[in-house]
Amino acid sequence: MLATGRPLSVGRTCEVVALILARPKRASQMIECLWDEDPGVANRAADALERASCQRPDLAAPWTDSLVGLLAEAEQNKLRWNLALIVPRLKLTVPECRRVAAALRTYLDDRSSIVKTCAMQGLAELTRQDPSLLPEVLDMLRILARSGTPAQRARGRILLRGLEAPHPDVARFRQPTLNGARG
């Protein structure tokens, strides 16, 4: 199902998401596709996992170690930006949070504005699990909200509003999805 289309096309991703949400035990097949030699298959698998994990972050939990490793190794832009959104949704230990934060910091130097913007989102998400990251993430967001690409400036302002919210019970920030909707 994921082999259909050009490398950056959506293909049958939405069908795969529906299938995985209906039959979560099939998630392992999709996860395996993240390492496929065909960049289109890997990209569509990452897109499907990102969409599914918006609704069910627990779907990827059994593969946390592998996904954290892939985050640090991924080279394809679409794979990188999806992983930047997926991995921070997982329940991570503090050492895992720090490893993920280190990988996401390298994404901030990527040529792709989308990768950079998703890395900002991922770093902000990580502060929920490792509050010690908050001062550094706030500083980074303040800088990028002033001097980054237009997408970084816009996302930075949204994230700052959420992270600087006065009450911890208030939703910290809205999670973007790559299909244009907000979660």
Image (spheres, rainbow, N blue to C red):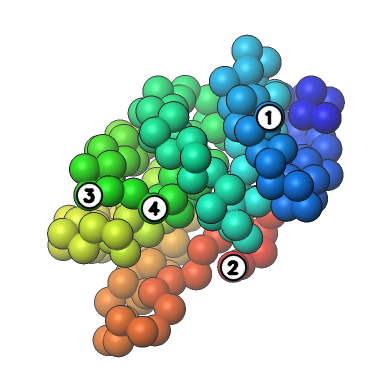
Residue in the foreground of this view, choosing between 155 and 24: 24
Q: Is residue 125 above or below residue 4?
A: below
Residue under numbered circle 3: 94
Between marks 2 and 4 in the image, the one whose residue lies nearer the viewer: 4
Residue under numbered circle 1: 29
Mark with earlier residue (4, 1): 1
Mark 1 residue element:
helix
* Residue at image point 57% right, 20% down: 35
Name the kind of residue labelled 1 in the image. Answer: Gln
Mark with earlier residue (2, 1): 1
Residue under numbered circle 2: 183
Name the kind of residue labelled 3 in the image. Answer: Val
Q: Residues within 10 Å of mark 2 (few under 14, many from 20)?
A: few
Horizontally, residue 168 falls left or right of residue 113, namely left
Alpha carbon distance from label 3 to label 1:
28 Å
Q: Residues within 10 Å of mark 3 (few under 14, many from 20)?
A: some
Residue under numbered circle 4: 91
Name the kind of residue labelled 4 in the image. Answer: Lys
Mark with earlier residue (3, 1): 1
Q: Check contact, mark 4 vs mark 3: CB within 8 A.
A: no
Alpha carbon distance from label 4 to label 1:
21 Å
* Residue at image point 83% right, 26% down: 4
Name the kind of residue labelled 2 in the image. Answer: Gly
Alpha carbon distance from label 2 to label 4:
19 Å
* Residue at image point 39% right, 33% down: 65
Is residue 122 shown to the viewer in this render? no
Mark with earlier residue (2, 3): 3
Q: Is residue 97 above or below residue 11?
A: below
* Residue at image point 53% right, 25% down: 76
Q: Check contact, mark 2 vs mark 1: CB within 8 A.
A: no
